[in-house]
Image (cartoon, rainbow, N blue to C red):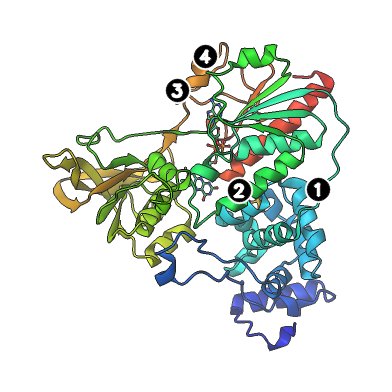
Amino acid sequence: MELNKIDTGISTKEMILNIVLYKEDPNYPTVYRYFRRQEMPKQPIVERIKNFNEVALGFEPDQAIMEASRCLQCQDPQCRRGCPVGINITSFCGYVREGNFDKAISVIRESNSLPAICGRVCPQESQCEAYCAMGQTGSPLAIGALERFLADYELKKGITMPSIAPITGKKVAVIGSGPAGLTVAGDLAKLGHIVSIFEALHTPGGVLAYGIPEFRLPKSIVAAEVDYVKRLGAKLETNMVIGKIFTIDELVEMGYQAIFLGTGAGSPYFLSISGENLNGVYSANEFLTRCNLMKSYLFPEYDTPLIVGKEVVVIGGGNVTMDSARTALRLGVEKVHVVYRRSEQEMPARREEVLNAKDEGILFNFLTYPLRLIGNSRGWVEKVECGMMELCEPDETGRRRPVPIPNHSFTIDAQTVIIAIGQGPNPLLSKVTKDLETDRDGRFIADEWGRTSKRGIWSGGDVATGWADATVINAMGTGKRAASSIHQFLTTGQW
Ligand code: FAD
Ligand code: SF4
């Protein structure tokens, strides 16, 4: 690759930062940093709205080397602090710059069992990349895209398995196979413990499998990463609803010395407005599960159709809303409207996904909320009546509180309405397990190591308390800490 021939396109700010850094360390090859942030190529918009294939296409090797060359190799790198599983980002970027992709991915694997997933769905802009020193120039290193590149490189070539500690004979049960459970299982299997994962659904992966659509996270990637955890030694049993088939106390009687609850937040919230029980009204969970797990987009090849009509309204403002809206579009809908009660600035969805949705033609109604759903004489939804909001003082979440404006209403035609306003834990396990404390939302109360109120039981991910955002990498971070606490408990007896 001839670096000098490439249009660098960097900003003046970046140029100044390079000169300053060059003065501090004249040995550092500053020429490598004279490149703008590399962007992943994407499927053209006109094509991608008609298919479920992945939108972002990943770096080419030259692009990855150029991007990694922008890394400043800071002495005290902050980016690692922004990663909940603590990947040594400067180290792996150093290897990518040298073209040593094998070594680079081995650095990532030391901390992360699911890099192809994280490289695709982590909200890097508010995690590792938010702490990158290059962010001062307005274009932080594309850490997630580099991680994805390396993970895909390794998947194509075949994963090199790490060494596994000798079998300890200690048995651990992991309930739920989402990112939290998979992380606990992978870390403990590597340490030689006998790990069994129990999953309620017929497919493992949690939200990665049933929630996040194929065009953002292909199921083959999820399957490959689950397979890696199995190859580390974890046993996986699907169709096992714990709380029904076995209780937690029965698992203890069966010889499991430690149990991790990573059962997620799969019970959708509803609006409690009139018309919610009309035909054509879905929770985002049901809508996405039908599409992802039951492959309704391949009807009649698969026998679960999703009849969506010409216009769809999706209510909410997070990643789940964006995924539902973009899925509906790909099912052939003419117009998809998002109804969100705050402004675009307050939307919790990843910025990249909001921009993708806008590019694809999703129509956004900000400062709008549903008043009621109106049906026809056959009981099918036909319209959504909406009111308008204005923003007042910030509430306890720090976001400005929306307040209805009186006498402002309008209707949107819709043959399908998808409610994506959040979800909470399923109460099954807390109901049937004694001495397991929950908060008022039904989340297991756990300390920073995931220890619950019941000795020998840990919890993490979306079903537990004690962390801020419901993200894949936060769930994995809680899993990592719980695994280290479980290991200590199994080896020293210390709770
Ligand atoms: P889950 O992924 O929910 O997995 C829990 C598993 O436990 C499930 O498989 C469930 O079937 C199983 N289970 C439940 N009860 C039982 C039981 N009794 N017995 C056995 N098994 C049980 N985060 C991001 O970082 N980036 C994104 O882009 C993003 N997009 C998202 C899009 C959607 C549509 C959704 C719904 C969420 C998204 N999130 C995203 C959030 C993220 O996916 C979650 O925070 C994360 O998956 C939580 O992981 P978890 O392991 O705690 O739970
Ligand atoms: Fe960043 Fe996520 Fe990778 Fe950590 S796992 S380095 S937060 S993209």
How far is disc 1 from disc 3 in space, using C-alphas?
Answer: 42 Å
Of residues 125 and 12, the one drawn nearer to the viewer in this rendering = 125
Mark 1 sits on what residue? 161
Q: Quadrant of residue 168?
A: top right
Q: Earlier in the sequence, mark 1 or mark 3?
A: 1
The Cα atoms of the two marked residues, 4 and 2, are separated by: 31 Å
In primary-sequence order, the first of circles 3 and 2 is 2
Label 1 vs label 3, nearer the camera:
1
Q: Residue furthest front?
A: 301
* Kind of residue sitting beneath label 3: Arg
Instruction: Identify the residue at image location x=37%, y=34%.
Output: 269
450 or 255: nearer the eye?
255
Using the image, determine if residue 283 lies above or below residue 51.
above
Marks 4 and 2 close (CB-CB < 8 Å): no
Q: Which mark is residue 222?
A: 2
Residue type, label 2 = Val
Q: Secondary structure at mark 4?
A: helix
Q: Secondary structure at mark 2?
A: helix
Residue 432 numbered tag = 4
Instruction: Please name the residue shown 11% across and 39% down the image.
Output: 377
Nearer the observer, 494 or 229: 229
Instruction: Tell me the tag on residue 440.
Output: 3
Please say if the residues under marks 1 and 3 sit with CB atoms less than 8 Å apart: no
Does the CB distance between marks 1 and 2 fall below 8 Å?
no
- Which-is-in-front pick, marks 3 and 2? 2
Q: Which mark is residue 56?
A: none
Question: Is 162 situated left or right of 254 in this image?
Answer: right
Q: Could you tell whether 138 is left or right of 340 in the image? A: right
Nearest to the eye among marks 1 and 4: give it: 1
Expressed as whole percent of the image width and height from the top left, the position of residue 438 reads 52, 20
Q: CA distance from mark 3 to mark 4?
A: 17 Å
